[in-house]
Structures are given as C-alpha cells and as structure tokens.
Amino acid sequence: MKILPNIKLIRYIINLDKNMKPGYNTELFLITNSYPFGAIAESFLDKELPYLSQFFENVTIVPLSYPLEVEYINRELPNNVFCDTSFVEQGRIAKKNRSQKKFKEKIKLFSVKPLYKEVYYNPRIFYDRNISGKMINYLNLALRMENWLKKYIKKNNVNLKSTIFYTYWMTWATLGIGLTKSVIKDIKLVSRAHGYDLYEERHSPPYIPFRTATLSKIDKLYLVSEHGKNYIIKKYPLLKNKVKVSRLGVTPQKTLSESSSDGAFRLLSCSYIVPVKRIELIIRGLNLIGRKRPYLKIIWTHIGYGLLMEEIAKLASDTLPNNVKVKFLGFLKNPEVLEYYRENPIDVFINTSSSEGVPVSIMEAQSFGVPAIAPRVGGVPEIVSDNCGILLNENPSPLEISDAIEFFINNKDLARKKRVNSYMNWDAKFNAEKNFCEFVKQLINL
C-alpha cells in the first residue's frame, strides 16, 4: 500500500497529543465484500485503509467472498493490517455439507426473533415468493455470520471493549453481527451505506430485508451522501441520532488532466456495463451530436466491463456515425485508470446511471480537474452542479445529453472555468486526507 496519509494533518484534525503514537486506540475488524482481493468494486478502500491502519493497533479485514477471477489481485497491505479468510473458507466447507444442514438451518430460522417482526410489517412475504425467498436467503447468510463471529470471538479471545466491527456495506453481514450483539452486548458495530445497500428501489423486488432489525443494532451508520442520510431518516426518523454523513474521497493528484488541443473532443466514462448504468444513453446522445456536427471528431472512451459488454459494443457500432470513435478499454485496475487521466487529454467525464450514491469515478475525474455530466440521482447533485459540470434530469433524453456535450464544445472559456471549479469542488468535499481523517476521529470517539 503505497498511499500514505498525512499524519500531521490527521493529528491536527483529530487534535491528538503530539506525543501520542499511532495505533494507540483499538482493534478494528473491517468486513468487506471481497477486498483486498477485488480489483474494482471496493478499490476506493485503498484510499481509506492507510488512515485506519495509522490509528488502530491492528486492522483485520474479513472478506465475505472471493471476486471473479478477472478481478482478483493481491494487494500489498500495511504491516498492521491482516486479512482473515476464515469466513469464506467456512462457506466453502458448508456448501459440501449443505444437504446435511438444511433441516437444522430451517429450525434455526424460526428461532430468530426479528423474523416475526419482519413478517408482520411486510405481509407481502406471505404471497410473494420472490420476497420470501430473498428474506430467507438474507437471514441464512446473516446466521452464517453470527455463527462464525461467535466462534471467532471465543477462539481468538477478542477483547470486545477495545474492538470495533465496521461493515463497509450495510448488508446481511451487518445484520449477522447485530444478531451476535443481541447475545454479546459489548460488541461495537458501525457500518457504511452507499447505494445498492441503501436504496430499496435499486432492487427487484424493491425490498431489502430486516432493515429495522439491522439499524437497531448499529451504534453508528455513516452515509456517503446527504441524500442517503435524508433517505434513512425519512424512513426511520427515530434513528436520526445514529446517522451521520461521512463522505468518501480520493487522494490528491500530482498533475491535472489536459483538455484536447488537436481539434477533437474527448469524453470518458468509467463503470460496470450493467443495466443500472444506462450506457446506451451515452450512445444515443453521441449519435445526435455526431450527426449534427459531422466534421467534428469525437472520441468516447469507456473503462469497465460487464454483462452488457457485447450488446453495448454492437449498439455503438450500429448507431454511431463515422466521426464518433469509440474505445472500450475493458477492465483496468485503479492505478491504470489514474494513469489514463495523467497520460490522455479528457474534455469531460460522463455518467448516465439511474441510481448512485456519490460516484467515486466522478471524484477521481474532479481530482484531475475534469468536469462531469451526470443525472440528478442519489447523491450526484452533491458532487456535480452547473458550477463544475452539467447536472442532467433524473431520466435524461438523448437530446439533453447531446446538448450537454455540445455546451462544452461551444463554450471553451466556460469549459476551462468548470475544470478549475471541478478541482476546487474535489478539494473542498472529496479530498481523502480531510474526509478520512474526520472519519477516523468519529471511530476513535466511539
């Protein structure tokens, strides 16, 4: 892990004694989806982990699964950060003995008190097999976490009075630790919530099981956006004292990105190619501007891959005029993404998602001084505004996207101003040094 935090800045923000050494505080268990092995989905933890490692004596990362082979990497971790894969391996063993345990698992389900409240407040469970199946699967996974954690605490003699459990996503793992906390009272549990683990509307059916049971056991919930905080408080007003905004961030860059100087216009997008990202809207918008400006060379580069890769590539090939060139770079590791910004001119970053938290991809673009075009969904208005980019409607038409792109083409002076403002917006709101220092302070105060 080569990114090192600014220790002087940390001490200033946290207001620590000058003689106090890093690692004075507690043990931290960080529960992730697949980090440190996953290359993409949780790569932004690379920015946060150095700060956690500086002020916790030991940090133990517990991944819940291994990533796809194409995304698998071996990260170099700080000396006091350890990865424990026993939960994943326990799951592998459980799969082999699955048939023997099915009956016991069903009996265990009916002993979980939150189950009855869940059924009472969600009567759809009785007649919608998709919802009931989702709930049962969610609870089974949570019980796996509870079972693993109880054994782990006992086997390793974990000192719970000096330990914090931090789930990076508010999923079934958070519920599982909460169920454990019902029995082992000294557990301190905090969680982050981003997008898919927060907004029920992003799911089909629009339902995330055991929200009340999960939230009731969390000591503190950190949302990555004001929008997320307001969403939770509106649904669960009694929990407002547990909820706090803690923004993610990216580290400062040594150089900023350049705009095009050869007469071409260059756009960049970076995401998984999946339905929620609505990449087809970019293509429809580029088709309009490309045909309107047939003598202008437009170059669109997309970083990322996904289930719709072939479909999107074919749509681009069939739809875009000859003056619009497309580059699908596929999967790139985060250092390679940052290198692309340093080595290539980029005029604007574009995002067309139907749902977001606050996209780290836009934070990275702004840290290089690249303005963004993005829709008014989730926490996006907290990072994109007319001051530093163009904010589209929630469901933008291809014409609206085309007009936004053409604005940057036609207004060079204003585009340059938006580049400056983009960098300033990143520094004010999404600078990793500032945001993660404050987050460490919050954890230490627990």
Image (spheres, rainbow, N blue to C red):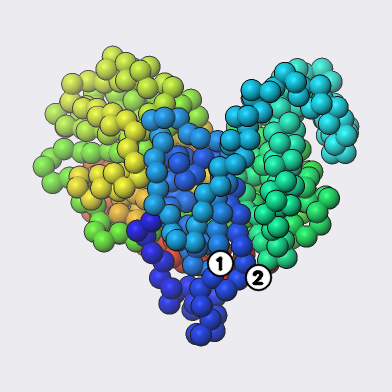
> Quick check: 101 left or right of 199?
right
The answer to whether residue 291 shows anywhere in this view is yes
Residue nearer the viewer, 37 or 228: 37
Q: Residues within 10 Å of mark 2 (few under 14, many from 20)?
A: few
Q: Earlier in the sequence, mark 2 or mark 1?
A: 1
Residue at 25% across / 56% down in the picture? 256
Residue nearer the viewer, 299 or 109: 109
Which residue corresponds to mark 2? 445
Which element is circle 2 on? helix
- In what quadrant of the picture does the N terminus appear? bottom left
Which element is circle 1 on? strand
Residue at 75% across / 21% down in the picture? 100
- The correct choice, above or below, for 255 with respect to 403 in the image is below
- The correct choice, above or below, for 247 with respect to 396 in the image is below
Q: Residues within 10 Å of mark 1 (few under 14, many from 20)?
A: some
Residue nearer the viewer, 382 or 216: 216
- In what quadrant of the picture does the C terminus appear? bottom right
Q: Residue furthest front?
A: 155
Residue 341 is labelled as none
Say which amino acid is labelled 1.
Answer: Glu
Which residue corresponds to mark 1? 57
Q: Residue furthest left?
A: 262
Residue at 43% across / 59% down in the picture? 78
**Percent x, y of residue 400:** 39, 33
